[in-house]
Image (cartoon, rainbow, N blue to C red):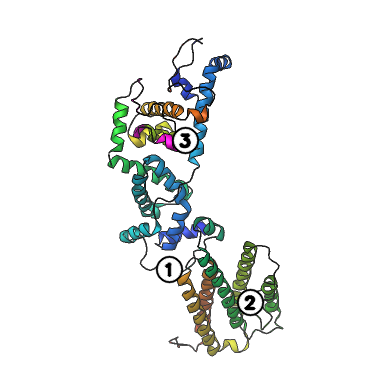
């Protein structure tokens, strides 16, 4: 039998032979070798498709062009980016010095976080049943001095990896945000109904927001700082609403 | 809303950090296809920047029907082909198609063996490389290639066969180390 046509052998690199062709390939080593060669070539091509390339452009050059096009906003907003740490690590490896800085910022965020909890938790009575339940479930919202129990115990050296510690931190933040929202939206007690209390809280929250905003200028994509900023902004907005309702009818907020 | 969706939302709003995040996450794939289609590092670098600008320019139109990477990849291919056309590299390939014949193309690299498929692809004519990359590497069909390049699917197939035959020869030592390659042509003769 004649050899298979050259073009047909090339085609068989990614298609199946007919029965007749198969019978021939079973007896003709030369055609079978060519067929296998083209299949191997196809395999190389597919593998090439999975190859990655070093970036052909630099971000500096690209961002300049994007700014000229108006595709980058003039002043980037530091609000919630939430790039997962794993993606960040893979996509934008940070130099060692910057990584150390990130950890320092995270530590600072944790301190802000605890301080904010103290501010927001001030004045909440321990014998209040619903609040006590929230405080137990939520490690972060500080109720007097024993609030960050869960967080503190997790920081005592029981973590086995950075990822585990960060995950705990995120969980604690979420709990904190839930608890803070609960405390502010569920019937504030005692002196908290007084405008002065809300004003003091607003001033404290402004300080917290200012501090986190300053930190975000250095690390705009840091998820911990972003979450903290968002939480403080939400608390501030909620407090503003409460202050508004605590004022005498006809009054409005000019300052606090 | 997932973290990726948030990044895309911020990127649409022009947030530089979000745009940079998309670029750093996807440029290894996007730039690779640009590099393969161009076959020339310097030209690829110029075109890659245009490609990314086009991706970000088109971002408001991205509706999430496909993965962002897939969507951006499509833009990268189209934009690169347009750019290649502009620099008149495609014209050479269109001449190749018009002059398509069974004759083996002139080969000044006879005897040359490539170390890798990437190196071997650079020895292909622009037209053959474009079709080979689109079909065998990127997975486009002949119909899709034909519509993007303004040729017939038969022309696409013809270029693919030329490319495979030449690559088979250039990479003979890699894919067939027991028998010498036969210049990419398999003459129909008796066994």
Q: Residues within 10 Å of mark 1 (few under 14, many from 20)?
A: some
Q: Is residue B169 above or below residue A99?
A: above
Was residue B124 drawn as part of the magenta stretch in this picture? yes
What mark, if any, has residue A77 been given in the picture? 1
Give coordinates of residue A4: x percent, y percent. 48, 16
CB atoms of marks 1 and 2 within 8 Å: no
Q: Label 2 belongs to which residue?
A: A141
From the image, state whether disc 3 or disc 1 is nearer to you.
3
From the image, state whether disc 2 or disc 3 is nearer to you.
3
Q: Is residue A153 above or below residue B126?
A: below
Write down the chain letter for disc 3.
B
Q: Residues within 10 Å of mark 3 (few under 14, many from 20)?
A: few
Q: Label 3 belongs to which residue?
A: B115
- The boundaries of the magenta stretch are B102-127
The first of marks 1 and 2 along the sequence is 1
Viewer-nearest residue: A3 or A201 = A3
**Tag 1 secondary structure:** loop
CB atoms of marks 3 and 1 within 8 Å: no
């Amino acid at each position: 039998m004649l050899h298979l046509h050259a073009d047909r052998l090339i085609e068989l690199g990614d298609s199946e032979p007919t029965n007749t062709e198969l019978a021939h390939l079973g007896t003709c080593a030369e055609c079978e070798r060519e067929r296998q060669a083209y299949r191997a070539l196809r395999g190389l091509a597919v593998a090439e498709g999975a190859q990655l390339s070093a970036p052909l452009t630099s971000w500096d050059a690209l961002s300049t062009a994007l700014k000229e096009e108006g595709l980058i906003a003039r002043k980037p907003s530091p609000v919630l980016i939430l790039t997962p740490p794993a993606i960040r690590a893979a996509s934008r490896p940070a130099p060692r010095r910057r990584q150390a800085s990130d950890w320092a910022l995270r530590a600072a965020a944790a301190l802000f976080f605890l301080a904010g909890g103290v501010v927001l938790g001030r004045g909440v009575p321990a014998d209040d049943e619903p609040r006590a339940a929230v405080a137990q479930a939520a490690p972060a919202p500080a109720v007097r001095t024993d609030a960050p129990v869960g967080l503190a115990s997790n920081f005592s050296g029981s973590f086995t990896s950075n990822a585990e510690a960060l995950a705990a931190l995120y969980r604690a933040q979420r709990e904190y945000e839930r608890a803070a929202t609960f405390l502010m939206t569920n019937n504030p007690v005692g002196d908290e109904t007084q405008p002065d209390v809300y004003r003091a809280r607003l001033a404290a929250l402004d300080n917290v927001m200012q501090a986190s905003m300053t930190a975000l200028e250095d690390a705009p994509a840091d998820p911990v700082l972003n979450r903290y900023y968002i939480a403080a902004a939400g608390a501030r907005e909620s407090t503003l609403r409460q202050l508004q309702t605590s004022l005498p009818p006809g009054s409005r907020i000019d300052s606090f | 809303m997932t973290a990726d969706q948030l990044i895309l939302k911020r990127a649409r709003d022009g947030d530089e950090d979000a745009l940079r995040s998309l670029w750093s996450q996807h440029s290894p794939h996007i730039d690779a296809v640009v590099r393969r289609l161009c076959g020339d590092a310097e030209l690829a670098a110029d075109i890659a920047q245009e490609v990314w600008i086009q991706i970000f320019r088109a971002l408001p139109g991205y509706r999430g029907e496909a993965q962002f990477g897939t969507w951006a990849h499509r833009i990268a291919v189209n934009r690169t082909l347009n750019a290649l056309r502009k620099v008149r590299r495609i014209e050479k390939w269109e001449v190749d198609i018009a002059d398509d014949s069974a004759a083996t193309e002139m080969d000044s690299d006879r005897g040359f063996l490539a170390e890798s498929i990437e190196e071997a692809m650079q020895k292909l004519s622009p037209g053959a490389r474009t079709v080979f990359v689109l079909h065998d590497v990127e997975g486009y069909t002949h119909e899709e290639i034909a519509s993007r390049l303004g040729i017939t699917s038969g022309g696409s197939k013809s270029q693919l066969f030329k490319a495979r035959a030449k690559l088979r020869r250039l990479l003979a030592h890699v894919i067939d180390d027991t028998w010498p390659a036969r210049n990419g042509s398999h003459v129909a003769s008796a066994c």
